[in-house]
Image (cartoon, helix red, strand yellow):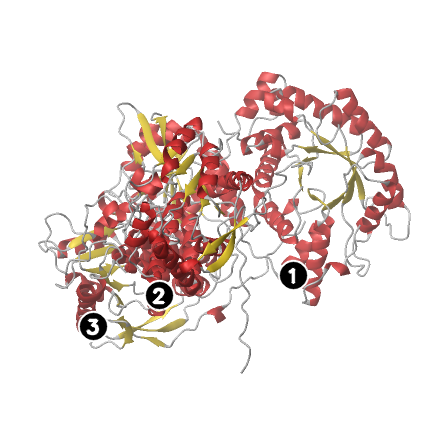
Amino acid sequence: MTTLVPAPGWMDDVTTSELALRRFLHGLAGVDQVGAEARASTLATRSIKREAKGWALDMAIRMTDLTTLEGNDTPGKVRALCAKALRPDPSDPEVPPVAAVCLYPDMVATAVQALAGGATAQAGEDGGRRVKVASVATAFPSGRAALATKLADVGDAVAAGADEVDMVIDRGAFLVGHYAQVLDEIRHVKAACGGAHLKVILETGELATLDNVRRASWLAMLGGADFIKTSTGKVGPASTPAVVLVMLEAVRDFADATGGAVGVKAAGGIRTAKDAVRYLVLVNETVGADWLTPDRFRFGASSLLNDLLMQRSKLRTGAYAGPDYFTLD
Amino acid sequence: MSDWDYAPAPESRELISLRSSYGLFIDGGFTAPVDGGAFKTVNPATEEVLGEVAEAGPADVDRAVAAARRAQTEVWGPMRPAERAKYLYRIARIIQERSRELAVLESLDNGKPIKESRDIDLPLVAAHFFHYAGWADKLRHAGFGSDPQPLGVAGQIVPWNFPLLMAAWKLAPALATGNTCVLKPAETTPLSALLLAEILQQADLPPGVVNVLTGAGETGRLLVAHDGVDKIAFTGSTEVGKSIQRTIAGTRKRLTLELGGKAANVVFDDAPIDQAVEGIVNGIFFNQGHVCCAGSRLLVQENVAEAVLERLKRRLATLRLGDPLDKNTDIGAINSPVQLAKIRELSDVGDAEGAQRWQPPCQLPDRGYWFPPTLFTGVSQSHRIAREEIFGPVLSVLTFRTPDEAVAKANNSPYGLSAGVWTEKGSRILWMAQQLRAGVVWANTFNRFDPASPFGGYKESGFGREGGRHGLEAYLAQGNETMGPAKVAAEDSHDG
Amino acid sequence: MADPRLEVRKTYKLYVGGKFPRSESGRSYEVTGAGGAFLANAAQASRKDARDAVVAARKAFPGWSSATPYNRGQVLYRVAELLEGRRAQFVAEVADARAAAAAEGASVDPKAARDAGQSRVDAGAQVDAAIDRWVWYAGWADKIAQVAGSSNAVAGPYFNFSVPEPTGVVAVLAPQASSLLGLVSVVAPVIVSGNTVVVVAAERQPLPAVTLTEVLATSDVPGGVINLLTGRTAELAPVLAAHMDVNAVDLCGAPAEQVTDLERTAADNVKRVMRPASEAEDWTAEPDPQRILAFTELKTVWHPIGV
C-alpha cells in the first residue's frame, strides 16, 4: 500500500513497536531504480543561464557546509577554513559567506573562536553567529561504538558550542532490520543536542538500494531529524542525484503528512558548480522553491566552493577563471 | 523564498540555414516538380513560414519510382551486402555529426521541444541506421532463410509526429535488405527529410537509392497506387491506413501499417508511485501527446486513485510549456491548426460527456498552436474520450478494481498498439504482459524505444513490426513471391 | 645533393591495461623480413607479462561487459575508422610479413608452409578485408541476443528466457600465418559480446598486431579490454592455458605439438577450449557467428506468471 494522507497522530502509532515501525517502513512505496535515475538525468538537462545561474551560484555558496574531517586536522587548519568560510573570496566582498563549517568535535571550540573574532565576522539576522559550526558526532564516520560513547561525543560537541550536529545512523542495525534501535538512537541524540540542529547521516552508499534510502529517510524524520544527510563523504558512492531525489521525495511526503519541514544535505563527491546547480534543480522541481534556502538544503563539500567562485567570476567577467585567483582554505 | 526563474535558454537558430524554397529529391539530386505545385511549411510555435516546399505530382512520382527501380536493379541490388552496410554506417555517422542541426530543424518544423528532439529523436535516428547497417551483411543469420531477397522498390509514407525518426525507421531496414526507397514525408513536416537527403549526398549514396517526394495526401495516394512500387510502408492515422489497405487489395504489393492507438497505462496499488507518476506524465505529455503509442488512458487501481491523482496534478504544475527552442521547455506546440481543432473538439466532447477537466495553470503564448496539459477524471469506457484517439496532451483517467478488470478494460478497444503496467510484483507484470492485446508492453517504464526492439500493433493499430531482427521481415521476399528486381549478390566471400 | 632523411623507427612494445610497457623480463627478439632482413626488435613477453595481462583483462571485464551492446558496437566501429586511417602503415607491415612468410615457405614446419602458400591475397586486399571484417563484427554486438537468445515455451505458468552472456577473460593464440586479417578474425568476435582478451600475436610477424594496439589505444576501447603480448607462443601458451583466472582459450595459433597438452591443462579450471582448425583456415571467407558464441554462456531465467 502506498502511504497516503494518514490520520492525525499516526506518527505515534507507527513508532509504538518494532513491528509497527517495520510494517510502516516496509509498506512505503518502492522506488524503481531505473525510473528514479531517469528522472534525475532528465532534470540534469535543465539549462540554467545568466541571472538564474548567478542566483543559483550564490545560493549554492550560501548553502555550503565547508568541511574538513581529516585525521590530521589541526587548529591552524581549522582557523584557515573558518577564514575562508567567512570570506570565500577576499577580492570580492559581495560573495556571501557559507552556511557552516563542518568539523570533528574536538575542533569545535577553535572554530567557534575563529568565527566569532575578527572584523569579518558579522552577526546573523537571528543574532546568532552567521556562519554556523556543525560538528560530526556519534563515532563518525562508522558509528560503530556503544550508545553511551556516541552520546558523550554529541555532548562534547554541544558543550564546545556547536550549532549543528551531524550524526551517523547505525547502518549495521538498519540492515539487520532493528529499526526501533536505530530510531531510539536518533531520539537520544536529538535530546542530547539540546538547541543544536540535528542532521542525520544515512550513509546511502552503504544502504545500497533506493528502497533503503527511502526507508532510512523516513526513519530519521520520525526520529526527529532537522536534516537528513546523504553521506559521511568517507564511503563511496556518496551523494548521487537519484539518492537525493528519493530523499527530497521523502521530505516532501513527510511535509504533506505532518506539516513538518525537514532539510536535505547532499554530501560527498560534489565537486563542481554544475553538479551543485543540478541539485538545486532537483530541489526546485521535487519539493519546491520553499526548500531553496540554507535552512532546508545544504551541500557538504570542500573543493566545491572554489568552483562555485570560479563560475561566479566567469559569469561576471565573461572570461574563464583560473585557480590562482582563488584562495586555498 | 522567492521562486527561482530559469532564465530563457534558447537553442540557436544559427545552426541551420533555411532555404526559401525546396525541390524534390530524385535520383540523387534536388529538382523542381514537373507537374506538382508548391506549399508552405510553418513553424507551429510562431506561425512563421519556414519555407516553400515542392508538391510532387504524378509525373514526379513516376520519375522517383523509375529512379528507385533503376537504382535497385543496377546498383543497390547487385551490390555486395558488406558495401551496403558501409553506406548505412556512413549515414549514421554523419547524422551523429549533424545531430544538433537536425534537432533544431525538427523542433522548428514540428513544434516539439528541443530537449526531446536532441535527447530522444536524434540519438534514435542515428541508432536505427547503425543497427540496420549491421544487419545488411548478416541476413542469412536472421532466420529468414539462407539467401533472403529484397522486394524491390518501397514506397514509404511517414507522419508528422516524429518526422525524421519515422523516416529512419522506414529507410534503414529497407536499405539494409537491398531495397530502394521513395519516401513521402508528412505535409506539415518536410524539412528534416530534405536535410537527410543532403546527408545522403554527403555519404555518396548512389543516386536513386533513396528519393524524397514532399507533398500532401494526394502525393501519398499516387505513390500507394503506383504499379512500380513493390512494397508500401505507412505510419499514420488508422483511417488512412485502412484506405491504403483497400487500395492495394488484389495487387502483389506488400504492406505494413503502423496506425493509431489508445493505450492503457495501468497503475496498481503497489506501483513505485513516484516513478509511476513520471511514467504517466511521460506517457501522455511526451511529444505533446502526438504519439501513436501514447498512454492516453490512465487505468488506476481504485484504492489508490486519489493519491495518484493528487501527485499527478502536483507534478503537472511543474511542466514548462513554451518555445520549443528553449532548452527548458517540456511541452511544445501542437503541430498544426487542424490538429489543434481536433484536440479542442474532443476535449469539449469530454466536458459534454460529463468528465471533469483539469489543467494546471499555464501561460499559452499569443501566436502559434498551443494546448495545455489536460486531465479528464471520472471517465468511463463508454465515453468517447476513452475510445477515440485524441493525439494531443489529454489524459483520460479511469479506475479498475482487479487485475482481470484492468485487462478487460485495457483490451476493450479496436486498437492494440501499446500498454503500460506499473507494479512492483514481477509475476503480475508478466501476467499482464501475457494478457494485454498490445504489440508493445512497457512495465515500470513508458515510451522506451530502441532499434533492437520490435515495435508495432495488434488489431486496428496496424500490422508488421519495426525494429530488431523482426523488422527485416517486412522488406524481404517470402517463399512463393516472384521477384521484381534482379536477384541480389549472395553474401559471398571477399575475394580481393 | 641533400642527405637522405633518417626515419625515426618505432619501438614495438606490449599492450597491457591500455598502456605500452616493455616486457618485465627486459627481453626482445628479432623480427625479420624476407631474406632475413632486420625489421625490428619486438618485446619478448614473459610469464609475468602474461599474468599482468590477465589481471588487466579481468579488471576491464565488469565495465566492458556491462556497456550496452550498442555502445560496444559503436566503439568497435570507431576502431574500424581508425584502421582505415592507418591503412598505408598496415599495408607496408603486412607486405613485409607476407614476404617473410613466403620466404620461410621452405621452413621445416609444413603447416606454416601451407599457410604461407595458401594466402594468395596481396597485402592491400588483406588490410581491406581486415577492416571490413572488423566492421562486420561491430555490427553483431546488438544482434547476438536476438539470434542466440530466446524465450522458451516451458510447460507451466512461467516466463522463461535465455540470453547469451560473455564468459569473461579469454586467452587467444593468434594464427601464425595471417598477421592482420587472421588476428582481427580471432580477436573481434571475442570482445564484441563483452569478453576481454589476452592475445598472443603471431610470433614471427607480430608488427601489424602492435600497430593494431596503437589503433586501439587511440580509440574508445577501454584499457584492458584487449591486451597484446608479442613473444614465443610456445613459452606463453602453457602459462595462459594453465591460468586459473582465464575462462576460455582459443588455440588457433598454438604450436601443433603443444595443442593436446594445452587442452589438458585447460581442464584444470574447466576452460572453454576452441581447438585449432584441422586444416589451414581461410581467413578471407566470411565467418559466421560461431566464434562469437563459442565464448558466451547461455543464462536461462524462470519467472512465474500470475497476478
Secondary-structure class at tag 3: helix
How many angstroms separate mark 3 from mark 2 (CA)?
19 Å
Q: Is residue C18 left or right of residue A86?
A: left
Q: Looking at the picture, which amino acid does disc 2 mark?
A: Leu
Q: Is residue B275 left or right of residue B243?
A: right
Q: Residue at (26%, 64%) from the top-left corner?
A: B184
Q: Position of residue C1 (x, y in %)?
A: 53, 83
Q: Residue at (39%, 65%) from the top-left corner?
A: B109
Q: Residue at (46%, 61%) from the top-left corner?
A: B324
Q: Position of residue B404 (x, y in %)?
A: 31, 28
Q: Position of residue C104 (x, y in %)?
A: 36, 53
Q: Is residue C166 visible?
A: no
Q: Looking at the picture, which amino acid does disc 3 mark?
A: Asp
Q: Chain of mark 3?
A: B
Establish if A23 lies above or below B382.
above
Can you tell which mark lies on residue B60?
Answer: 3
Can you tell which mark lies on residue A51?
Answer: 1
Q: Name the foreground residue: B398 vs A167.
A: A167
Count of labels in the image: 3
User: Which residue is identified by label 2?
Assistant: B196
Q: Chain of mark 2?
A: B
Secondary-structure class at tag 2: helix
